[in-house]
Image (cartoon, rainbow, N blue to C red):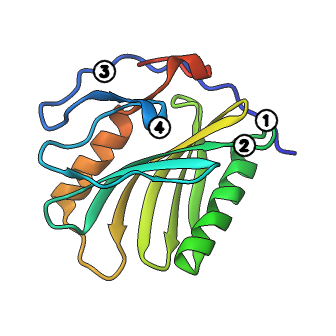
């Protein structure tokens, strides 16, 4: 089993006007979707819940995936499980990069599936985990402004304080 990293407290940040902040109990997080982005129907199974918001073009997304871990594992093993699930749902999953961010208390990663390229932050705490991401369609040109907003939303998202990750 991988080593579990203790998440660091995150400083409260000023939320930009381009984002709307609200509590989303389905994914145990305070989410920050960009103004005007459309929430999609919640995807869920017995092990995960996935909420995403699509940009006006439909080519960019901001999303939060909350999942249950079978054992308290570290972020590397949780990422392995995430990529396996991505491969099942999209037909492929390729890790492009990953690095531990001690200031965030999370694993930052970039991965490509059959349809999407995601830039995610992965948090693992006890038997719970989150992936918060900014994603783009692989077969469409990247709208830099939309990707910037999705990234800002990702960085403004806070997990449930009761999960052992502070800094709402």
Q: Determine which residue is flagged by label 1.
A: 72
Instruction: Give residue 27's mark.
Output: 4
Given this view, does label 3 or label 2 mark the residue nearer the observer? 2
* Label 2 element class: loop
Q: Determine which residue is flagged by label 3.
A: 13
Residue toward you, 145 or 34? 34
How crowded is the residue under tag 1: few (<14 C-alpha within 10 Å), some, or many (20+)? Answer: some
* Label 3 element class: loop
Task: Specify the farthest residue to the front.
Answer: 46
| Residue 127 point in image, percent of width and height | 72, 34
| Residue 74 point in image, percent of width and height | 74, 40
Residue toward you, 160 or 80? 160
Q: Are marks 1 and 2 in contact (CB under 8 Å)?
A: yes
Inspect this view and state whether residue 94 appears: no
Q: Earlier in the sequence, mark 3 or mark 4?
A: 3
Quarter that holds the C terminus: top left
Q: Earlier in the sequence, mark 3 or mark 2?
A: 3
Q: Are marks 1 and 4 in contact (CB under 8 Å)?
A: no
| Residue 66 point in image, percent of width and height | 54, 42
How crowded is the residue under tag 3: few (<14 C-alpha within 10 Å), some, or many (20+)? Answer: few
| Residue 125 point in image, percent of width and height | 67, 30
Quarter that holds the N terminus: top right
Given this view, does label 3 or label 1 mark the residue nearer the observer? 1
Inspect this view and state whether residue 12 appears: yes
Q: Determine which residue is flagged by label 2.
A: 69
Residue displayed at 51% across by 31% down = 104
Give the answer, above or below, for where 1 lies relative to 59.
above
* Label 4 element class: helix
């Amino acid at each position: 089993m991988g080593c579990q990293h203790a998440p660091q407290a995150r400083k409260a940040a000023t939320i930009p006007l381009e984002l709307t902040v609200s509590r989303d109990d389905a994914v145990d997080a305070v989410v920050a979707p960009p103004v005007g982005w459309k929430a999609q129907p919640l995807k869920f199974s017995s092990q995960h819940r996935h909420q995403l918001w699509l940009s006006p073009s439909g080519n960019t997304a901001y999303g939060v995936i909350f999942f249950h871990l079978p054992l308290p594992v570290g972020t590397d093993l949780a990422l392995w499980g995430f990529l396996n699930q991505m491969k099942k749902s999209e037909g492929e999953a390729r890790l492009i990069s990953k690095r531990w961010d001690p200031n965030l208390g999370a694993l930052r990663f970039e991965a490509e599936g059959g349809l999407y390229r995601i830039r995610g932050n992965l948090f693992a705490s006890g038997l719970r985990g989150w992936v918060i991401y900014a994603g783009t369609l692989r077969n469409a040109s990247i709208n830099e402004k939309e990707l910037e907003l999705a990234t800002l939303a990702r960085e403004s998202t806070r997990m449930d304080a009761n999960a052992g990750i502070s800094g709402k």
